[in-house]
Image (cartoon, rainbow, N blue to C red):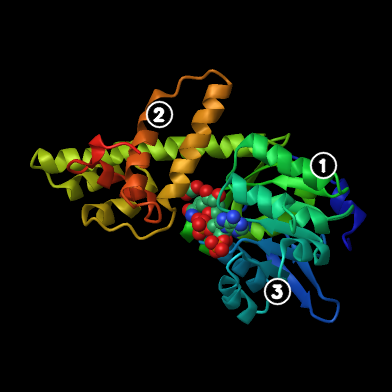
Amino acid sequence: MAASSSFFAAPIPNAYHSSSALQRPQLCLFSKRFSSVTISASSKVGDEVSASIGFLGLGIMGTPMATNLLKAGCDVTVWNRTKSKCDPLISLGAKYKSTPEEVAASCDVTFAMLADPESAFEVAAGPQGAAKGMSAVKGYVDVSTVDAPTSKQIGERIKETGAMFLEAPVSGSKKPAEDGTLIFLTAGDQPLYEKVSPLLDIMGKSRFYLGDVGNGAAMKLVVNMIMGSMMASFSEGLLLCEKAGLDPSDLVKVVSQGAISAPMFSMKGPAMIQSLYPTAFPLKHQQKDLRLALELAESVSQPTPIAAAANELYKVAKSNGLSDQDFSAVIEALRSKLGHQTE
Ligand SMILES: NC(=O)C1=CN([C@@H]2O[C@H](COP(=O)(O)OP(=O)(O)OC[C@H]3O[C@@H](n4cnc5c(N)ncnc54)[C@H](OP(=O)(O)O)[C@@H]3O)[C@@H](O)[C@H]2O)C=CC1
Ligand SMILES: O=CC(=O)O
């Protein structure tokens, strides 16, 4: 890899890094001639990185993340199972390869943003998976939301090739992905974390380094377990308002003023009242995250009755055809008779 050795050697000063507006990473130079980018990041001002970047998985999240890398001038090669989703990126200057293996073989660092543990493993370690194209001095960064055991398996397959591995699931939805304000929850090879930090800073506003592989995955599941329960509780509140003769719009305003305010309630509440669920975070993924969080809780004997109840609601919503709607559509599981059904 054409990265300077100092890029791998620097210690991590803090587990948490936040990019303020003044500190946002800036692309200083893009040289097509040398097929490289020079990136100056907040934490490593002046460092130069030359890297070709692979991006596997161009769904709701992968597309804007890869787009931001391209717009910052990075040399990006893309792959997606459904090839047509690569076209907008190709029109912005991305290269295309027809398998994850070929992407990994042609890039220094490859990011993957896949739907679930099964697809993340398949793309990383399947017959034409990225591991087949990896070798020493390359890196693989899995930003999908998966469980810790799957992440460890992916990490093992990648590291068998001599390459480095970082798990880096993100908190933040479609809009933060578009705005480059995601929160990265990383764990794994520290030198790779250092290497890709300027790239994470293009796609996100903050990053945490949490140690061994599995810790980032677990932290992401805890966060999304809380989020799923919050949305289910908020849904109950909106419907209780309606039944009690109160205006649910007033609830959204009241909640926004106090200690339980959350951007999610203000952003999604008005649409939920109109039964509109434009998809930012698909409901099927929220249910997947609750299921995986419950497995995590089980593995450490931690009771999570609120999350277990919320999970049942998301399952009802899924079985009623709402998988691809936004996760706020879970409110539909509480309307009328739906709440009494199970999968
Ligand atoms: N949306 C959100 O707000 C957030 C999502 N996440 C997490 O990020 C990940 C991606 O989410 P998102 O972009 O919303 O999901 P999407 O459903 O929009 O995209 C999923 C991606 O995975 C690919 N994929 C699915 N199954 C397979 C398979 N068997 N083999 C190869 N590729 C496959 C899809 O390819 P194809 O196009 O061919 O279907 C697509 O590229 C998930 O783990 C999710 O939990 C994390 C934070 C926020
Ligand atoms: O995983 C979803 C998110 O909004 O974060």
Residue 78 at x, y = what percent?
68, 68
Q: 315 and 305: which one is in front?
A: 315
Q: Quadrant of the N terminus?
A: bottom right
- Residues at marks 2 and 3, CA–CA distance in whole angstroms: 42 Å
Residue occupying image coordinates x 31% and y 48%: 320
Q: Which residue is mark 2?
A: 308
Residue 217 at x, y = what percent?
62, 39
Question: Quick one: label 2 or label 3, which is nearer the N terminus?
Answer: 3
Question: Quick one: label 2 or label 1, which is nearer the N terminus?
Answer: 1
Q: Which residue is mark 3?
A: 96
Q: Is label 2 in contact with label 1 (beta carbons under 8 Å)?
A: no
Amino acid type shown at disc 2: Ala
Amino acid type shown at disc 3: Tyr
Residue occupying image coordinates x 73% and y 71%: 97
Q: Quadrant of the C terminus?
A: top left
Q: Is label 2 in contact with label 3 (beta carbons under 8 Å)?
A: no
